[in-house]
């Protein structure tokens, strides 16, 4: 049911962890299953994503899609990172079962939330970026998970 690439990223997820003093951090919840994802971004002065890490309570598909999404945004500019949609991530993984498509949204939304956080802190305007609706970081700031 899962492609080889999905299994590879599930079994060997890239970029798991956290970044101390990140340039931007976003935490989002999945409306469908209630799972949570947090993305940390380290962005340099040229607006290039130097490093990215993720942590999730999501399922295997969420782990695999986040792993791939973080690989795709690493080294890119913040504007290019906006093109890493859940669709692009699913294509890079050779597809996901339809019931798992909602899981792939977590990575996209958390990256957007982290970019929003970075943009707010630095007074930067990122084309096409809107305030993420599902950003829950304000409510759970003190929680450590
Ligand atoms: Fe919740 Fe996949 S079932 S992220």
Image: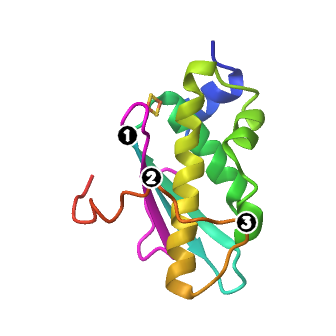
Rendered location of residue 37, percent (x, y): 43, 48
Q: Is mark 1 within 8 Å of ligand 1?
A: yes
- The alpha-carbon separation of the residues under discs 2 and 1 comes to 15 Å
For the stretch drawn in magenta, the main secondary structure is loop
Q: Quadrant of residue 3?
A: top right
- Name the residue carrying label 3: 75
Q: Which residue is mark 1?
A: 57
Counting residues from the N terminus, which is met first, the one under dot 2 or under dot 1? 1
Residue 26 part of the magenta segment:
yes
Regarding mark 3 in the picture, which secondary structure is present there?
A: loop
> Mark 1 or 3, which is nearer the eye?
1
Q: CA distance from mark 1 to mark 3?
A: 25 Å
The range drawn in magenta is 16-34
Whether residue 3 is in magenta: the answer is no
Residue in view at x 72 percent, y 84 percent: 46
- Observer-nearest residue: 88 or 134? 134
Residue annotated with mark 2: 134
Q: Which mark is residue 101?
A: none
Q: Image quadrant of ligand 1?
A: top left
Q: Quadrant of the N terminus?
A: top right
């Amino acid at each position: 049911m899962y492609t080889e690439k999905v299994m590879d990223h599930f079994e060997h997820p890239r970029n798991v962890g956290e970044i101390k003093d990140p340039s931007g951090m976003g935490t989002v919840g999945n409306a469908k299953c209630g799972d949570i994802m947090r993305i940390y971004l380290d962005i340099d002065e040229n607006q290039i994503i130097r490093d990215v890490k993720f942590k999730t309570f999501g399922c295997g598909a969420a782990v695999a899609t986040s792993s791939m999404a973080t690989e795709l945004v690493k080294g890119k500019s913040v504007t290019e990172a906006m093109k890493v949609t859940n669709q692009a991530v699913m294509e890079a993984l050779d597809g996901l079962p339809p019931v798992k498509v909602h899981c792939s949204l977590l990575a996209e939304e958390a990256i957007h939330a982290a970019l929003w956080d970075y943009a707010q802190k630095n007074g930067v305007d990122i084309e096409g970026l809107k305030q993420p609706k599902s950003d829950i970081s304000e409510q759970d700031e003190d929680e450590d998970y």
